[in-house]
Image (cartoon, rainbow, N blue to C red):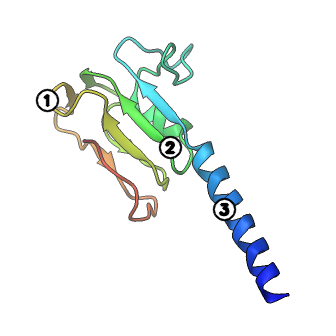
Amino acid sequence: MCGFLTRIFLAIAMFALLCLSASAATIRVATSGSNTTGNGSFLAPFATIQKAVDTALNGDVVLVAAGTYSGAGNRDINLLGKVITVKSSSGPSQTILDLGRNKGFSATSSEPMPSRMPT
């Protein structure tokens, strides 16, 4: 009986893990994107990193296309306590945050350790 219960528990745990990994999304940002008509997809990216973070759920990846990002929504970005990854699709030399005298990211909403900053 104990072995049967163990197998059921393991099956439920594996199912839950598959559901969690299947739910992770990639949310895209591009200089040509739009926060009004975009939805964060490859064909309709958002214009600002903050809009993508606002839309993201725990486990999601915010993928920022090559280009220079400045202005509201691309500085003082609040991770909102989410466990997400924000990274460049082309590497840090191709994706630039023009912050002026502002900070780039704020992790002030109780973000747990797994949250990742841009790479």
C-alpha gap between disc 2 and disc 1: 23 Å
Q: Is residue 90 shown to the viewer in this render? A: yes
104 is higher (above) or lower (below) than 100:
below
The kind of residue on which mark 1 rests is: Ser
Q: Is residue 6 left or right of residue 79?
A: right
Going from the N terminus, do you reach mark 3 or mark 2 first? 3
Q: Residue furthest right?
A: 1
Residue identified by numbered label 1: 93
Q: Are marks 2 and 1 in contact (CB under 8 Å)?
A: no
Residue identified by numbered label 2: 60
Q: Quadrant of residue 62?
A: top left
- Number of marks present in the image shown: 3
Task: Name the secondary structure under disc 3.
Answer: helix
Q: Are marks 3 and 2 in contact (CB under 8 Å)?
A: no
- Quarter of the image with the C terminus is top left
Return the residue nearer the eye: 5 or 51.
Answer: 5
Q: Is residue 73 shown to the viewer in this render? A: no
> Which is closer to the viewer, label 3 or label 1?
3
Q: Residue furthest left?
A: 93
* Residue 27 at x, y percent in the picture: 49, 31
The kind of residue on which mark 2 rests is: Asp
Q: Residue 50 got which mark? A: none
* Residue 95 at x, y percent in the picture: 22, 27
Q: Residue 14 got which mark? A: 3
